[in-house]
Image: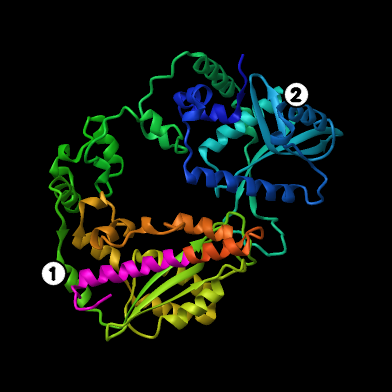
């Protein structure tokens, strides 16, 4: 009889085909960068959990990577006879195995019992967490562990880090004892089903669908979808089509040419028409009129931010967005284009210096153009609350913000955009000589965040940090120069050499 890890049973819960592939065709799995990043965050939160639940450092940690499974299970069993906290305790029984994040010994009426805590980096309890804990508790009880209670601890996003490495309060516990203990027969059924699925000589015949992304993006999606019809003009290119695309797919409609016009709004009809005819839509008169009410000088602004599941700066919260970089192009009344920027890679909280530099750079008057205003205005509003000394100036900048995204969305569409108005799609369509893929190293916001994390790490060399700095500066500068060039085309200002 095969023994299944907790992750394998959760794979079954998502899709039996995923379980079969993980066992028989694991080389076909391709995890996304986002999935890999979530693993890293999970490890970081797990490290902090040990400090929270074992502040005196008296506990033991099982490291299956270095110890191997046999030694990990043997040492875990020995430790479960002790009276010290155990982290990543290996449990193996009843056809399943798991590693418990936190096992805490307690005494009740002179008898030793255990409190199990599963730790997650999310900010709430998810349904798949409940399955996770159910498996964990089932294996522990089957292995003879006397469980008194079971809890799931997740990040409390309202908590503020007081500094000095004090993370008490970061995690919020949810007691799942009664629910978890009631699901024993469910878990047994999952193990039985997993045995049947894994023993099959052929993979289950399951079509791709919404389960491929719920609760996680499946790493086998490319494999499973390899034989699916590849439409020339996919329905999902229609903006905001959402669940309607899946509904259409069940009817065999996967190409734009087959979507009835009467079920589309005006923007979706425009995307369909210009995609199928391979023509550009540009309401130059309307775009020019939209911008004509705003005079020069003009400012073109973009931010880069970072967020940490575990805060590293005093006075900040989990997953709070921190501004660490801006780029600002300024176009004077005479058509002179200047550029200034801010980037802090010291590893200290950059936000106060950011706010000071931003206020100094944005002047007192003139439109401040951004692309997708909610992001920049939201960050400035947060900075205004955090730093009251800059509040009037920051809110004054907010009042001057003009969003180029709605103008692009309403006045321009090129088939190469494939239904998207992200600046990375619009820029090469409007100004073909400018492309993000020509940048070195940092090419998007996600890469910018990873680059920032690497740059501030204590192990990063001075030489590598200098390379990252130049890459970040070049990326953010292109973002604002892109807006300058979009503004020029939309405003019809071909008289300016930019």
Q: Position of residue 409 (x, y in %)?
A: 24, 60
Q: Position of residue 36 (x, y in %)?
A: 53, 43
Q: How is the image coloured?
A: rainbow
Label 2 residue SS:
loop
State whether residue 471 is above or below residue 391.
above
Label 1 residue SS:
helix
Q: Position of residue 437 (x, y in %)?
A: 37, 55
Residue farthest toward the front in the current orientation of the protein: 463
The image quadrant where one finds the C terminus is: bottom left
Q: Would residue 113 be found to the left or right of residue 178 on screen?
A: right
| Residue 485 magenta | yes
What is the distance, in whole Å, between disc 2 and disc 1 at their CAs?
76 Å
- The local crowd at label 2, few if under 14, some if 14 to 19, many if 20 or more residues have their Cα within 10 Å, is few
Whether residue 81 is visible to the viewer of this picture, yes or no, is: yes
Q: Which residue is mark 1?
A: 285
Residue 144: image tag: 2
Q: Picture quarter containing residue 94?
A: top right
Residue farthest toward the right in the current orientation of the protein: 110
Please state which of residues 331 and 13 is positioned toward the viewer in this rendering. 331
Q: Earlier in the sequence, mark 2 or mark 1?
A: 2
For the magenta stretch, what is the residue range? 472-498
Please state which of residues 373 and 431 is positioned toward the viewer in this rendering. 431
Q: Position of residue 379 (x, y in %)?
A: 46, 68
Q: Please tell me whether the stretch drawn in magenta is mainly helix, strand or loop.
A: helix
- The local crowd at label 1, few if under 14, some if 14 to 19, many if 20 or more residues have their Cα within 10 Å, is few
The image quadrant where one finds the N terminus is: top right
Q: Would residue 310 be found to the left or right of residue 367 on screen?
A: right
Residue 14: image tag: none
Whether residue 317 is visible to the viewer of this picture, yes or no, is: no
Q: Picture quarter containing residue 432?
A: bottom left
Q: Picture quarter containing residue 386?
A: bottom right
> Nearer the viewer's eye, disc 2 or disc 1?
1
């Amino acid at each position: 009889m095969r023994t299944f890890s907790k992750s394998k049973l959760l794979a079954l819960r998502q899709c039996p085909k995923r379980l079969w592939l993980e066992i028989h065709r694991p080389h076909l799995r391709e995890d996304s960068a986002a999935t890999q990043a979530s693993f890293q965050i999970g490890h970081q939160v797990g490290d902090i959990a040990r400090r929270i639940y074992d502040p005196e450092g008296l506990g033991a940690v099982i490291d299956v990577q270095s110890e191997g499974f046999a030694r990990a299970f043997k040492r875990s069993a020995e430790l479960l006879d002790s009276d010290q906290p155990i982290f990543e305790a290996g449990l193996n029984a009843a056809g399943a195995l798991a590693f418990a994040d936190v096992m805490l010994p307690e005494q009740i009426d002179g008898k030793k019992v255990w409190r199990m805590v599963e730790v997650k980096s999310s900010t709430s309890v998810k349904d798949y967490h409940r399955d996770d804990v159910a498996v964990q508790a089932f294996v522990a009880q089957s292995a003879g562990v006397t469980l008194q209670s079971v809890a799931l601890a997740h990040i409390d996003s309202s908590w503020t880090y007081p500094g000095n490495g004090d993370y008490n309060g970061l995690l919020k516990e949810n007691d799942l004892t009664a629910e978890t203990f009631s699901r024993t027969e469910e878990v047994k059924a999952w193990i039985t089903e997993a045995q049947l699925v894994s023993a099959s000589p052929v993979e289950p015949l399951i079509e791709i669908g919404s389960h491929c992304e719920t609760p996680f993006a499946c790493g086998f999606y490319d494999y499973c979808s390899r034989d699916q019809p590849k439409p020339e003009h996919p329905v999902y290119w229609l903006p905001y089509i959402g669940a309607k695309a899946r509904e259409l797919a069940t009817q065999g409609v996967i190409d734009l040419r087959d979507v009835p016009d009467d079920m589309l709004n005006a923007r979706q009809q425009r995307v369909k028409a210009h995609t199928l005819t391979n023509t550009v839509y540009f309401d130059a008169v309307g775009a020019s009129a939209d911008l004509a009410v705003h005079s020069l000088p003009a400012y073109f602004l973009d931010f880069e931010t970072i967020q940490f599941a575990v805060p590293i700066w005093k006075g900040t919260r989990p997953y709070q967005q921190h501004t660490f970089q801006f780029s600002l192009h300024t176009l004077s009344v005479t058509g002179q284009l200047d550029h200034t920027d801010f980037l802090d890679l010291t590893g200290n909280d950059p936000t106060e210096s950011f706010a000071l530099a931003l206020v100094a750079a944005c002047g007192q008057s003139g439109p401040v153009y951004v692309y997708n205003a909610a992001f920049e205005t939201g960050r400035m509003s947060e900075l205004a609350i955090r730093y009251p000394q800059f509040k009037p100036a920051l809110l004054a900048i907010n009042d001057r913000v003009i969003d180029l995204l709605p103008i692009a969305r309403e006045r321009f569409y090129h088939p190469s955009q494939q239904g998207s108005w992200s600046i990375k799609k619009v820029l090469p369509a409007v100004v073909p000589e400018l492309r993000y893929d020509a940048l070195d190293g940092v090419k998007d916001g996600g890469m910018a965040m990873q680059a920032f994390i690497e740059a501030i790490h204590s192990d990063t060399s001075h030489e590598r940090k200098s390379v990252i700095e130049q890459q970040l500066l070049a990326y953010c500068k292109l973002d604002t120069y892109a807006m300058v060039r979009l503004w020029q085309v939309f405003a019809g200002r071909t008289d300016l050499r930019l």
